[in-house]
């Protein structure tokens, strides 16, 4: 009995000092208010809600840009992407220059150097040529697509329902095309489970990058009977079908972690806000209320996202954390728990002592944004923002909001607090001094002035 007790103690000790696995689940264009934990009622999202309840739900979780590729570049490098020119989606210019700049190290580079097996499954959108390919950017394996959007219902021999704006069954395994039959969300989930379960005890880092709930709004036959009959708008029904598939997938992922990989730190967030209204972006009917704005805007609806952190036994369950956090924090947090060297220039912080309550201070003095002509900075509960009106293609003036009282950014305090406006404007300008011009142009509604 004494020997058995010593063995159990030894096993527990080894587990506590083992490098934990790290899983980042990024979803695409998810509406802030479409999940149950944020008040969504159109369809149940039990698995996403359960994930939020099992870990720490960060109520002020931010991305670094309100748009797909630059937001991902910020997460991957732990730096604001305007520091190195990745301000817009890499769609216009020379292919050998489009994408995450080659002088930037990724979270996969850093963790692989520390002994992790690294994988990317799903959407990349950080470049298309060989040098910008995931296998050249720190990932040992890749299964997914390189561009910004992809059909969901795949047929090896059939023509996709949607046109040339979407990648047409261009799923890659490594560097080779591997046409698929099936449903993207399920295929990516299957691959994720296989990646986790074949590592044979080696620590792993997986970037699971779902294209749900981005357009096209395809409805899987198996989902049709589960969709609410009172919602008749075809686009909204398509969006809810994609959300339903995503929630099912999260359930499978969490079940596998509990059974086989309990020592795993998981981050869950969207790449930007939902795309509900803008006429110039891929509208998917997402709902961001009570937040103002949408994907592509520096209002809260474009940059504040569902953001959960889950690590059983290490982070408290059922906790909400209200200080602002950022996707910039994923890389340094991962480095801290993996005993990896943090690259120079990182702007995020290790979130663990903040989420456990060991450090009661806010992780960030301020967070700031630049997206073409749009600007924003948050210090404490005040936010100064200059956003874009898509219809008129004009910017607002500087607007000031107290997010502790006005999460929907409806009551502009700029005229009432001119000194605070000047203070925050000066802070944004100091922050902007370290930014560089975009390496490639954006769309007309993105171009900086």
Image (cartoon, grey):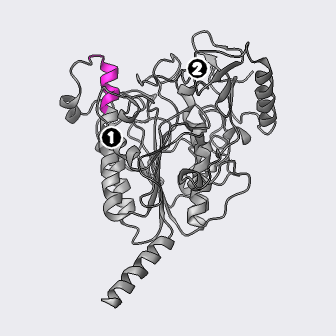
Quarter residue 376 falls in? top right
263 left or right, relative to 115: left
Q: Outermost residue toward the left?
A: 225
Quadrant placement of the N terminus = bottom left
Relative to 154, say whether 165 is above or below.
above
Q: Horizontal placement of 13 versus 224: left or right?
A: right
Q: Which residue is mark 2?
A: 409
Q: Residue at position x 68%, y 23% from top?
A: 447
Task: Determine whether the residue tagged by mark 1 lies in a helix, strand or loop.
Answer: helix
Q: Does the magenta segment cover residue 277?
A: no
Q: Residues within 10 Å of mark 2 (few under 14, many from 20)?
A: many
Residue closer to the observer: 128 or 50 = 50
Residue 138 in the image, given as x and y percentages of width and height:
57, 58
Q: Nearer the viewer, residue 421 or 147?
A: 421
Residue beneath disc 1: 247
Q: Secondary structure at mark 2?
A: loop
- Count neighbours of disc 1 (C-alpha within 10 A) and say few if under 14, some if 14 to 19, many if 20 or more: many
Look at the image and tell me whether residue 186 can be seen. no
The region drawn magenta spans 232-241
Image-quadrant location for residue 213: top left
Mark 2 or 1, nearer chain start: 1
């Amino acid at each position: 009995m004494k020997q058995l007790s010593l063995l159990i103690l030894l096993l527990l000790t080894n587990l506590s000092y083992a490098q934990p696995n790290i899983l980042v689940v990024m979803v695409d264009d998810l509406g802030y208010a479409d999940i149950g934990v944020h008040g969504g009622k159109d369809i149940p999202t039990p698995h996403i809600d359960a994930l939020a309840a099992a870990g720490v739900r960060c109520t002020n979780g931010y991305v670094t840009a309100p748009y797909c590729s630059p937001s991902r570049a910020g997460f991957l490098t732990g730096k604001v992407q305007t520091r190195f020119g990745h301000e817009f989606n890499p769609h216009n210019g020379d292919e050998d220059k489009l994408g995450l700049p080659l002088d930037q190290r990724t979270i996969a580079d850093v963790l692989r150097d520390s002994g992790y097996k690294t994988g990317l499954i799903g959407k990349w959108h950080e470049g298309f040529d060989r040098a910008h390919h995931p296998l050249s950017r720190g990932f040992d394996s890749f299964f997914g697509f390189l561009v910004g959007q992809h059909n969901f219902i795949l047929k090896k021999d059939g023509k996709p329902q949607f046109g040339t704006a979407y990648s047409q069954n261009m799923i890659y395994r490594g560097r080779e095309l591997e046409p698929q039959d099936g449903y993207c969300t399920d295929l990516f989930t299957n691959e994720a489970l296989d990646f986790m379960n074949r590592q044979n005890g080696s620590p792993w880092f997986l970037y699971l990058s779902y294209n749900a709930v981005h357009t096209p709004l395809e409805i899987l036959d198996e989902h049709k009977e589960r969709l609410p009959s009172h919602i008749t708008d075809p686009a909204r029904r398509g969006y809810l079908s994609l959300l339903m598939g995503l929630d099912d997938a999260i359930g499978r992922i969490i079940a596998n972690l509990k059974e086989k990989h309990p020592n795993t730190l998981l981050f869950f967030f969207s790449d930007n806000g939902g795309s509900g209204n803008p006429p110039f972006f891929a509208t998917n009917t997402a709902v961001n209320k009570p937040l103002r704005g949408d994907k592509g805007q520096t209002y809260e609806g474009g940059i504040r996202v569902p953001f959960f952190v889950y690590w059983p036994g290490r982070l408290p369950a059922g906790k909400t954390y209200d200080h602002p956090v950022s996707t910039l924090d994923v890389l340094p947090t991962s480095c801290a728990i993996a005993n990896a060297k943090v690259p120079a220039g990182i702007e995020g912080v290790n979130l663990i002592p903040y989420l456990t309550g060991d450090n009661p201070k806010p992780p960030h003095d301020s967070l700031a944004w630049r997206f073409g002509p749009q600007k924003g900075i948050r210090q404490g509960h005040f936010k100064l923002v200059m956003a874009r009106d898509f219809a008129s293609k004009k910017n607002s003036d500087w607007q000031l909001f107290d997010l502790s009282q006005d999460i929907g950014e409806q009551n502009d305090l700029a005229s009432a607090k001119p000194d605070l406006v000047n203070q925050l404007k000066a802070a944004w300008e100091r922050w902007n001094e370290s930014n560089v011009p975009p390496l490639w142009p954006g769309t007309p509604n993105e171009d900086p002035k």
